Image (spheres, rainbow, N blue to C red):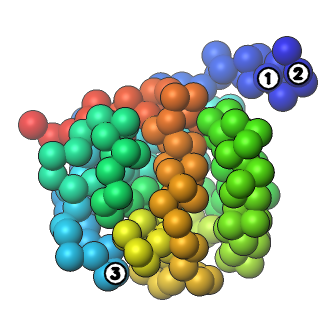
Amino acid sequence: MNARRAFLAATAALLVPARHAAANDVSGVALPDRARPEGSEVELRLLGGGLFRFFFLRYYVCGLYAPDGLREASAILANDAPRRIHLVALRRITSFEFLWGLDQGLADNLSPAEAEALREPLAQVRATIRAIGAIARGARVSIDYVPRAGTSILVDDQRRGENFAGKALNDALMRVWIGERPLDASLKEALLGGGRRG
């Protein structure tokens, strides 16, 4: 077990499972039932929402949006359809903190060959996140994917940086939250409907 895995194993017990009453009301944050990314003709439905914590610190509320009919992680990743990961910051999150979590999730879900194939676009994503800087408490961050248009990052509905082309890139980013080895397993469960209103 390498040092990073040892650190994650040692801290796993400190990750408190998210508690949520309904997908659109998570820890006092209301998530919209529907969303339509810019350039998409498809309206997306909120599948579920949860809370990401680390070392007992509440970092953000997270919601997953996908077209009607797509509920399982495998189906969401397999279909070339619009989707959104939506975050609402519960504290100031530095770009270092955000990238640390992103890189952990990517490392856990990408093979060396996949990581190498996406090296340049992932470097561009990281550069955009660094340029955004710290995410203020209460800020809303959306990571949107629309076929042909690619992936876009929005902060408080304002696009930041350029679109990133290719479904494979967005698949990699989505796997941070809903991959086989997500950043937080309890959050993945919530995103896939564990907190969805009936």
* Residue 29 visible to the viewer: no
CA gap, disc 3 and disc 1: 38 Å
Question: Which corner quadrant of the image does residue 35 belong to?
Answer: bottom left
Tell me the residue that label 3 is attached to.
38
Cα–Cα gap, marks 1 and 2: 5 Å
Q: Is residue 51 left or right of residue 182?
A: left
Query: Is residue 150 found left or right of 72 in the rendered image?
Result: right
The one nearer the camera, 110 or 62, is: 110
Could you tell me which quadrant the N terminus lies in? top right
- The amino acid type, in three-letter code, at marker 2 is Asn
Whether label 1 touches label 2, CB < 8 Å: yes
Residue name at image x 45 percent, y 27 percent = 186
Residue 115, numbered label: none
Crowd band around label 2 with a 10 angstrom C-alpha radius: few (<14), some (14–19), many (20+) = few
Q: Earlier in the sequence, mark 3 or mark 1?
A: 1
Nearer to the camera, 162 or 117: 117
Q: Nearer the viewer, residue 106 or 129?
A: 106
Q: Secondary structure at mark 2?
A: loop
Residue highlighted by disc 1: 5
- SS state under label 1: helix
Measure how far apart labels 3 and 2 are at the Cα level: 42 Å
Q: Residue 20: x and y, percent? A: 32, 35
Q: Is residue 14 above or below residue 59?
A: above
Q: Quadrant of the C terminus?
A: top left
Name which residue type carries label 3. Glu
Q: Is residue 80 left or right of residue 69?
A: right
